[in-house]
């Protein structure tokens, strides 16, 4: 009440879904539009739909203990050989065995680094399901490569990796759990995309077309209501029912707005801003000192975050930008060798050559030899 007496009533409010906050806002600012944060709504919805299945899938996968085994295989393999990749860049490879091993390495590496993060966390990113999916893809690629590989060491590595991957992708309990989770996630993603949540990056707060989004969400909910009367799997019916109930329960607050239509869809931007500062401080100083550092230097830390603001950057660093200003004050350097993207591209090219049976062991192809022979014939004539 003191806030209302001093500042008056705001044109609207956005908050998470805690009942205490929502009740207080409704009582103190009677009649004010109250909007709930879209990200909080979807996170709670996704958690209710998938957290048990997702955790169960992760538990089953971890019991197989294949991550450490695949890491061990990866450690036993040599790093990417740049001389061989330079040959690939020129269309040949004098050491097929090295290229085969690099192809295997490139298949296994993404499996161990997979998280599929969209920047929003669970349930927008399902790490255990992404890991399972990446294992299936890696197993398929290794199977294709095994039909073309000729080196003994390559075949041993492929066989070993496929053995460990097979522990996951052939386990019927894991396969069934992943299948159910994937099907439920498809329903969740339908509503998520109806709200126009971008697949990756920052959630846009300034999408003005609430009416169109509302119509699209209602269309998706209508489709799910049809599922309730269809002869489909029980877990899909339960998921659809859960989504429908939660949506109708919060529908009014999801689309509440003030007269000017200026209420954002989420308070996630501000929360993310403070989480980022706190996380960075914790990494550098530890949990114990975090509170003290924030209390003493919070203003300066927040000011530093302005480097994400292009107007602020232009004001401080001029039209050249941050990188150009700092570049004037340091020596230019570049690590020797190929960039990661170049290595990945050339390994992919070499793998494709192996699979397509056109990996030559010399830089001379039939076309070049025929042209040379024709030239000699002309000279002889």
Image: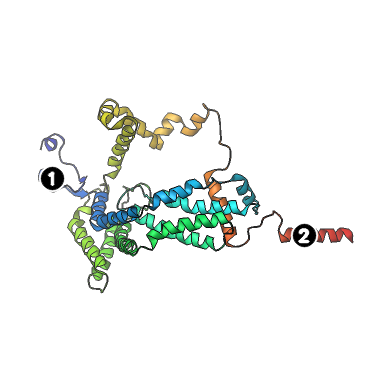
Q: Which residue is mark 2?
A: 371
Image quadrant containing the C terminus: bottom right
**Which secondary structure lies at badge 1?**
helix
Provide the residue designation for mark 1: 20
Looking at the image, is mark 2 or mark 1 nearer the viewer? 2
Residue 347 in view (yes/no): yes
Which residue is nearer to you in this view: 54 or 196?
A: 54
Residue appearing at x 53%, y 60% in the figure: 145
Quadrant holding the N terminus: top left
Left or right: where 357 falls relative to 252 = right
Q: Are marks 2 and 1 in contact (CB under 8 Å)?
A: no
Q: Residue at x 13, y 38 (%)?
A: 4
- Neighbourhood count class around disc 2 (C-alpha, 10 Å): few under 14, some 14–19, many 20 upward: few
Which residue is at a point 18% across and 42% down the rendered structure image? 10
As drawn, which residue projects farthest toward the right?
381
Figure quadrant of residue 339: top right
**Residue 190 point in image, percent of width and height:** 31, 61
Q: Residue at x 59, y 53 (%)?
A: 97
Graded by Cα atoms within 10 Å as few (under 14), some (14 to 19) or many (20 or more), the crowding at tag 1 reads: few
Measuring from the top left, give residue 48's x and y in whole percent.
Answer: 22, 56
Q: Measure the alpha-carbon separation of dots 2 and 1.
A: 83 Å
210 sits to left or right of 115: left
Percent position of residue 178, x then y = 33, 61
Q: Which mark is residue 2?
A: none
Counting labels gives 2
Nearer to me, 76 or 344: 76
**In this picture, is 357 found above or below 69?**
below
- Out of 52 and 142, give the one closest to the viewer: 142
Q: Position of residue 301 (x, y in %)?
A: 33, 30
Q: In the structure shown, which secondary structural element does the residue marked by tag 2 occupy?
A: helix
User: Which of pointers 2 and 1 lies earlier in the amino acid sequence?
Assistant: 1
């Amino acid at each position: 009440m003191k806030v209302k007496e001093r500042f008056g009533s705001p044109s609207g409010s956005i908050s998470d879904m805690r009942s205490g906050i929502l009740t207080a806002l409704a009582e103190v600012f009677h009649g004010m539009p109250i909007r709930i944060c879209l990200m909080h709504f979807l996170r709670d919805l996704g958690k209710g739909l998938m957290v048990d299945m997702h955790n169960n899938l992760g538990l089953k996968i971890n019991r197989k203990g294949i991550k450490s085994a695949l890491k061990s295989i990866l450690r036993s393999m040599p790093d990417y050989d740049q001389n061989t990749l330079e040959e690939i860049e020129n269309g040949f490879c004098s050491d097929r065995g090295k290229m085969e091993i690099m192809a295997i390495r490139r298949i296994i590496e993404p499996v161990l680094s997979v998280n599929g993060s969209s920047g929003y966390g669970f349930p927008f990113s399902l790490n255990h399901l992404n890991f399972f999916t990446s294992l299936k893809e890696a197993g398929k690629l290794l199977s294709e490569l095994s039909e073309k590989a000729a080196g003994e060491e390559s075949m041993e590595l492929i066989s070993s990796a496929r053995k460990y991957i097979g522990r996951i992708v052939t386990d019927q309990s894991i396969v069934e759990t992943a299948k159910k989770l994937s099907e439920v996630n498809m329903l969740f993603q339908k509503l998520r995309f109806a709200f126009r949540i971008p697949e990756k990056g920052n959630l846009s707060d300034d999408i003005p077309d609430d009416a169109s989004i509302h119509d699209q969400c209602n269309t998706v909910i209508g489709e799910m209501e049809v599922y309730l009367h269809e002869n489909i799997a029980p877990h899909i019916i339960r998921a659809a029912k859960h989504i429908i109930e939660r949506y109708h329960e919060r529908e009014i607050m999801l689309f509440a707005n003030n007269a000017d239509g200026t209420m954002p869809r989420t308070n996630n931007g501000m929360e993310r801003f403070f989480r980022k500062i706190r996380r960075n401080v914790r990494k550098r100083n530890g949990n114990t000192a975090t509170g003290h550092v924030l209390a003493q230097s919070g203003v300066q830390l927040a000011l530093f975050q302005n480097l994400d603001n292009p107007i602020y950057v232009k004001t401080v660093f001029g039209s050249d930008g941050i990188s150009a200003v700092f570049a004037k004050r340091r020596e230019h350097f570049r690590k020797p060798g190929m960039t990661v993207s170049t290595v990945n591209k050339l390994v992919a090219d070499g793998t494709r050559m192996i699979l397509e049976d056109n990996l030559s062991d010399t830089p001379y192809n039939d076309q070049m030899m025929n042209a040379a022979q024709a030239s000699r014939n002309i000279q002889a004539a």
